[in-house]
Image (cartoon, grey):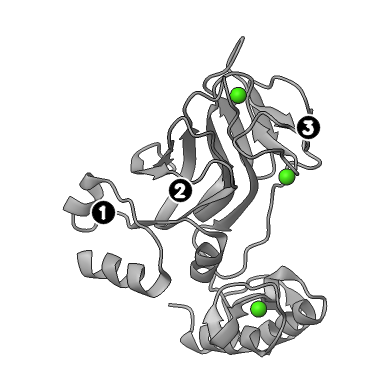
Amino acid sequence: MAITINARLLLLGTTVALTGADRLHAGAPTLVQYSTMQTFLAATGPLPVIENFETAGPRDTLLPTLVLPVGVFTALDGEPFANVYILGPGAANFGVAVTSSTVLTANGNEDWRLDFASPVSAFGFETYLNGSGPGTLTVFGPGGAVLGTFTQSHNSTQIGYLGITSETAIGSIRFTTVNGRQINTGIDNIRVRAFPSPCVADIGVQGGVAGHDGVLDNNDFIVLIDYFFMQDARADFGAQGGAPGPDGAFDNNDFIVFIDRFFGGCS
Ligand SMILES: [Ca+2]
Ligand SMILES: [Ca+2]
Ligand SMILES: [Ca+2]
């Protein structure tokens, strides 16, 4: 297992923060943490943002729970009662100078659980910290067993990234930050990959329509080409030099990486 983790570190330039228990037990679920969106998406393949909070609601309201397509947020801390809070851009009470997007935060300390609407094999989101200490992420299986605990730490004057991939199903997560009652912390732009994870190149079904059908054939290429000419982020498979991961450019690198994935098959 150590060799696998080291190989991933070298290949992807990512950080791993498995708990001691995960390292000790052979066959324990392998979770990998990514600290940039680029490295996360290089591992997962393209994933759209499924929650950016821009149209989520009710806004500017103390919410004990928040039901969204991604799942249900349950608040575990806050003032005067446990809450989450959808806050629009222009806020100056975060580690960043001023927010430029609607984010999820809380009045009082931020601490919440997200029960995913259906099990996921990967998730990622942007994080806002405040310099008071790291965030703590706990990842649970669908039955509630702890799969791993991770630390999120970055320059609080900048937006960070927290991505996790898992070989086993993830049912929920808890994210707890420090002293958010003084300076807010928050998250934004959630991406998830379903469990079981669909084959990365399996993006098309019969008739050249977007979807997963467990078969790799010309329908997947048709959908790739559609996405490519629409400049849809779901075609942004590759970056400079044919490296996996998005770069915002739509060019031959996307085809190189897609073809690699396609002929790599669905193992
Ligand atoms: Ca947003
Ligand atoms: Ca707060
Ligand atoms: Ca690209």
Residue 99 location (% of width, % of height) = 72, 40
Q: Can residue 102 be seen from the camera position used here?
A: yes
Badge 1 vs badge 2, beta-carbon distance below 8 Å: no
| Mark-to-mark CA distance, 1 and 3 | 38 Å
| Type of the residue with mark 3 | Gly
Residue 15 circle label: none
| Type of the residue with mark 2 | Ile
Residue 125 location (% of width, % of height) = 58, 49
| Type of the residue with mark 1 | Ala
Quarter of the image for the C terminus: give it.
bottom left
Q: Can residue 1 be seen from the camera position used here?
A: no
Q: Which residue is mark 3?
A: 57
Q: Which residue is mark 1?
A: 28
Residue drawn at point x = 59 percent, y = 47 percent: 158
| Quadrant of the image occupied by residue 253 | bottom right
Query: Mark 1 or 3, which is nearer the eye?
Result: 3
Residue drawn at point x = 56 percent, y = 73 percent: 245
User: Mark 1 or 2 closer to N-term?
Assistant: 1
Q: Dot 2: what SS?
A: strand
In the displayed structure, 175 sits above or below 63; it is: below
User: Mark 1 or 3 closer to N-term?
Assistant: 1
User: Mark 3 or 2 closer to N-term?
Assistant: 3
Q: Quadrant of ligand 2?
A: top right
Q: Which residue is mark 2?
A: 170
Relative placement, left or right, of 21 versus 45 is left
Residue in the foreground of this view, choosing between 104 and 73: 104
